[in-house]
C-alpha cells in the first residue's frame, strides 16, 4: 500500500474505532441507567402472559412436541446427534463490529444443494439434504457426497422440513381466518393485564433510554443471523401458497461446557446462548420454523407437562397458605419469596426463546419455555418488528431453524453464471495460444472486475476461511470450488490484460484514462479486502483453531509463482496506475 493510501486506510480504521468506542460507551450508560431496574417480561406462569402474547406477539406460534409424529422426533433427534458426532457442528468465527468473535453456539447449514447463507460477514455452505427415495447427492464421480449416516441424517432434516412447510402454511392460514374474524369483532388491540403501569418520571426516563437503546440496537448484534432490521417495504408473500423453506441452520450448545455466557441485559431474562437479533437475509415476511431438542442430562420426569408444573406450583402455594395459618405475616412473605425464587430457578433451567418488540421498551418482553421436541414459528412480520434471543437452560440443546433464505446472489448456480459471463470476454487464439480481451468497453470491464472481486471475496476466501470443515465430511463443494478457482485464475489473467492495455501508450488517451480508473478502483478494493482476509486468518482466535478447522488464506501465492499473471500484493501495480493517471 502507498503511504497516502495507508494513511487514509488507517484514518478510516480510527474513525470506525472511535464510533465503536462511542457505541460501547452508550451501551454501558444505558445498562448503568437501568441499574437494578429491568424492563418487565412475562413467562407462562405470570398473569397476563397469554394476553400479552395475543396482543404484542401474535406472529409467534408454539407447536408442542405432540403435534409432530413420534417417528419424526426419533429420526430428527438421532440426526442431530449424528451431526454432532461427525464433527459437522462448529462455532463460526464471525465478524461483529470489525471484531472477530466465535459464536457461542456450534452450527452447520443443511439445505438445498448449492445454496449458501450469509450472516455476520460469514458465508455458510449447505450440506445438501437428501430427498426421500432419492439415492442422495452425488459428486462428479457419481460417488455419494457423504457417508450413509450423514446421508440419513440429512434426509431426516429434509423430512422435518417437509412437515414444517405444510404445517406452517396450515397454521398461518387457520390463524389468518381466526384473526380476520376477531378483527371485525374487536378492532382494538387490548394490552394484557400484566402490562406495567409507569409513573410519569419512569416514563420520561424510559423515553430517553428508548432513544439510546434505538441507537444501540442499530449496531447490536446477537450472533444470530443478523445485525440490522430487514427491509420493510416488500410485497407480502402469498399466505395461501405453500411455504418453501430452503435450508436449516442447526445450532448446538452445551451450557456446562461454556465458561461464560452473557446475561440478557435489558429484562434480566438470564444467560443467553444467542443474543438479541433479527434473522437476516430472509425472503421478506417469510416464516421461520424452529425445532428444539434439549438432551436430558438425567432421566426426565416424564409426564410432567408445562401445565402440570404450573398447577402443581399453584397447589403448593395453596398448601403453604393453609399451613401458614397461625404463622406471622413476615414468615409467610419470606416463604412466598422463596417459592417465587424456586419458580424462577425452575424456569431458567429450561431453554427459552425470548422476544421483544424492536425499538420499544414499554411493551414487556416475552420468554417462552421450550420442552424437548417443541417447535415454534415466527410468522408474518414478527422477524422484522421484533427481535429474538435464545436463553440457555441447564442441559445441552440442539435447534434446527428452517428458513426461506433470499438466495438471488447466494447459490452456486448464480456464481457459476457470473463466472461464465466474465470469461466470455476472454479470447484465446488457438494457433498462437495467446489471450486477449474481446471488448474494451469500460462498463464491460468494470462489470468483469466486479465479478472477479465477488468470486474472490464472497466465495473463494469465504470458503477457505472455514478451513477444510466442509470437505472433511461432505465432498459436495470440493469440485465446484476447484472449478471456481480455475475461473478466478482466468480472471486474474484478464486483469493483467487490462493492465497491459492501460499501460500501452498506443491505446487511445480518452479510453485509457477511463480504463485506468476502472482498474484502479477494482485493484484498490481487492488489495483492501485481501488485507482484511489476511487479518482475519491471522487473528489470535483463528490461530488457536485445530489444523483441520484452521482458516486458510487461499488463494495465496508468492511473487515467483509462474502460474500467476499478477502478484498477490497489488501495491506496486496500484502505484503504477495511480502515477499514470496523474500524468494524463
Ligand atoms: O435456537 C433457537 O431457538 C433459535 C436460534 C436463532 O435465533 C438463530 O439461529 O438465528
Ligand atoms: Fe434467529
Image (cartoon, rainbow, N blue to C red):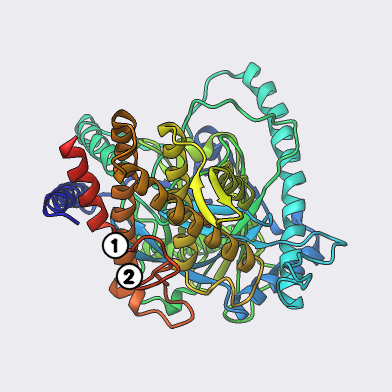
Q: Is residue 314 visible?
A: no
In the depicted view, which residue is nearer to us: 129 or 416?
416
Q: How many marks?
A: 2
Find numbered disc 2 in the image and state the secondary structure of the residue it sits on.
loop
Q: Which mark is residue 559?
A: 2
In the depicted view, which residue is nearer to us: 428 or 205?
428
> Which x, y percent locates residue 172?
69, 36
182 shown above or below 464 = above
Find numbered disc 1 in the image and state the secondary structure of the residue it sits on.
loop
Q: Is mark 2 within 8 Å of ligand 1?
A: no
- Between label 1 and label 2, give the one nearer the viewer: 2
In the depicted view, which residue is nearer to us: 207 or 582?
582
Residue holding disc 1: 569
Q: Which mark is residue 278?
A: none
Q: Is mark 1 within 8 Å of ligand 1?
A: no
Contact (CB < 8 A) between labels 1 and 2?
Answer: yes
Q: Is residue 284 left or right of residue 218?
A: right
Quarter of the N terminus within the rendering: bottom left
Please tell me which residue is depicted at 20% across the width and 34% down the height of the picture: 208
> Which x, y percent locates residue 219?
31, 46
> Which x, y percent locates residue 122?
44, 57
Which image quarter: residue 475? bottom right
Disc 2 residue crowd, few under 14, some 14–19, many 20+, Cα 10 Å: few
Disc 1 residue crowd, few under 14, some 14–19, many 20+, Cα 10 Å: some
Which image quarter: residue 236? top right
Q: Is residue 14 left or right of residue 120?
A: left
Q: Earlier in the sequence, mark 1 or mark 2?
A: 2
147 shown above or below 330 = below
Q: Is residue 213 left or right of residue 340?
A: left
Q: Is residue 382 visible?
A: yes
Which image quarter: residue 535? bottom left
Quarter of the C terminus within the rendering: top left
Amino acid at each position: 500500500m502507498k503511504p497516502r493510501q495507508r494513511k487514509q486506510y488507517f484514518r478510516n480504521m480510527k474513525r470506525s474505532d472511535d464510533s465503536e468506542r462511542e457505541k460501547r460507551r452508550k451501551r454501558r450508560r444505558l445498562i448503568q441507567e437501568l441499574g437494578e431496574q429491568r424492563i418487565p417480561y412475562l413467562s407462562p406462569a405470570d398473569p397476563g402472559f397469554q394476553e400479552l402474547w395475543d396482543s404484542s406477539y401474535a406472529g409467534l406460534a408454539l407447536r408442542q412436541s405432540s403435534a409432530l409424529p413420534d417417528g419424526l422426533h426419533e429420526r430428527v433427534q438421532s440426526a442431530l446427534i449424528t451431526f454432532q458426532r461427525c464433527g459437522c457442528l462448529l462455532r463460526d468465527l464471525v465478524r461483529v463490529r470489525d471484531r472477530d468473535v466465535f459464536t457461542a453456539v456450534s452450527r452447520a447449514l443443511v439445505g438445498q444443494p448449492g445454496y449458501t447463507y450469509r450472516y455476520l460477514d460469514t458465508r455458510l455452505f449447505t450440506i445438501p439434504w437428501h430427498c426421500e427415495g432419492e439415492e442422495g447427492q452425488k459428486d462428479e464421480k457419481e460417488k455419494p457426497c457423504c457417508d450413509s449416516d450423514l446421508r440419513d441424517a440429512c434426509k431426516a432434516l429434509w423430512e422435518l422440513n417437509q412437515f414444517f412447510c405444510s404445517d406452517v402454511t396450515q397454521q398461518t392460514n387457520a390463524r389468518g381466518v381466526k384473526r380476520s374474524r376477531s378483527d371485525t369483532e374487536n378492532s382494538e388491540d387490548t394490552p394484557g393485564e400484566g402490562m406495567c403501569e409507569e409513573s410519569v418520571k419512569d416514563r420520561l426516563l424510559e423515553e430517553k433510554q428508548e432513544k439510546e437503546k434505538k441507537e444501540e440496537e442499530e449496531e447490536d448484534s446477537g450472533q444470530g443471523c443478523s445485525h440490522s432490521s430487514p427491509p420493510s417495504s416488500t410485497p407480502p408473500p402469498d399466505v395461501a401458497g405453500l411455504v418453501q423453506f430452503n435450508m436449516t441452520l442447526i445450532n448446538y450448545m452445551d451450557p456446562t461446557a461454556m465458561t461464560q455466557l452473557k446475561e440478557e441485559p435489558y429484562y434480566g431474562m438470564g444467560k443467553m446462548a444467542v443474543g438479541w437479533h433479527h434473522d437476516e437475509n430472509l425472503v421478506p415476511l417469510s416464516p421461520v420454523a424452529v425445532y428444539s431438542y434439549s438432551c436430558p442430562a438425567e432421566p426426565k420426569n416424564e409426564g410432567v407437562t408445562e401445565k402440570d408444573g404450573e398447577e402443581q406450583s399453584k397447589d403448593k402455594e395453596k398448601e403453604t397458605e393453609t399451613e401458614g395459618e397461625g404463622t406471622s405475616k413476615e414468615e409467610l412473605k419470606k416463604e412466598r419469596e422463596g417459592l417465587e425464587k424456586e419458580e424462577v430457578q425452575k424456569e431458567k433451567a429450561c431453554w427459552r426463546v425470548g422476544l421483544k418488540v424492536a425499538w420499544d421498551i414499554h411493551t414487556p418482553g416475552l420468554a417462552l419455555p421450550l420442552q424437548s421436541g417443541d417447535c415454534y414459528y415466527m410468522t408474518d412480520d414478527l422477524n422484522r418488528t421484533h427481535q429474538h434471543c435464545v436463553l440457555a437452560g441447564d442441559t445441552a440443546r440442539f435447534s434446527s431453524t428452517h428458513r426461506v433464505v433470499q438466495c438471488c446472489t447466494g447459490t452456486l448456480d448464480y456464481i457459476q453464471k457470473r463466472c461464465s459471463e466474465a470469461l466470455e470476454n476472454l479470447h484465446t487464439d488457438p494457433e498462437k495460444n495467446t489471450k486477449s480481451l474481446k471488448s474494451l468497453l469500460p462498463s464491460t470491464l468494470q462489470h468483469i472486475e466486479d465479478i472477479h472481486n465477488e468470486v474472490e471475496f464472497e466465495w473463494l476466501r469465504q470458503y477457505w476461511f472455514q478451513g477444510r470443515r466442509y470437505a472433511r465430511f461432505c465432498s459436495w463443494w470440493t469440485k465446484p470450488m476447484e472449478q471456481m478457482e480455475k475461473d478466478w485464475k482466468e480472471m486474474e489473467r484478464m486483469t493483467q490484460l487490462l493492465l497491459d492495455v492501460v499501460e500501452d501508450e498506443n491505446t487511445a488517451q480518452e479510453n485509457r484514462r477511463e480504463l485506468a480508473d476502472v482498474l484502479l478502483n477494482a485493484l484498490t478494493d481487492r488489495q483492501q479486502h485481501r488485507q482484511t482476509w489476511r487479518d482475519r486468518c491471522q487473528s489470535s482466535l483463528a490461530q488457536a483453531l485445530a489444523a483441520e478447522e484452521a482458516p486458510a488464506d487461499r488463494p495465496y501465492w508468492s511473487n515467483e509463482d509462474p502460474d500467476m499473471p499478477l502478484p498477490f500484493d497489488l501495491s506496486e501495480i496500484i502505484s503504477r496506475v495511480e502515477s499514470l493517471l496523474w500524468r494524463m
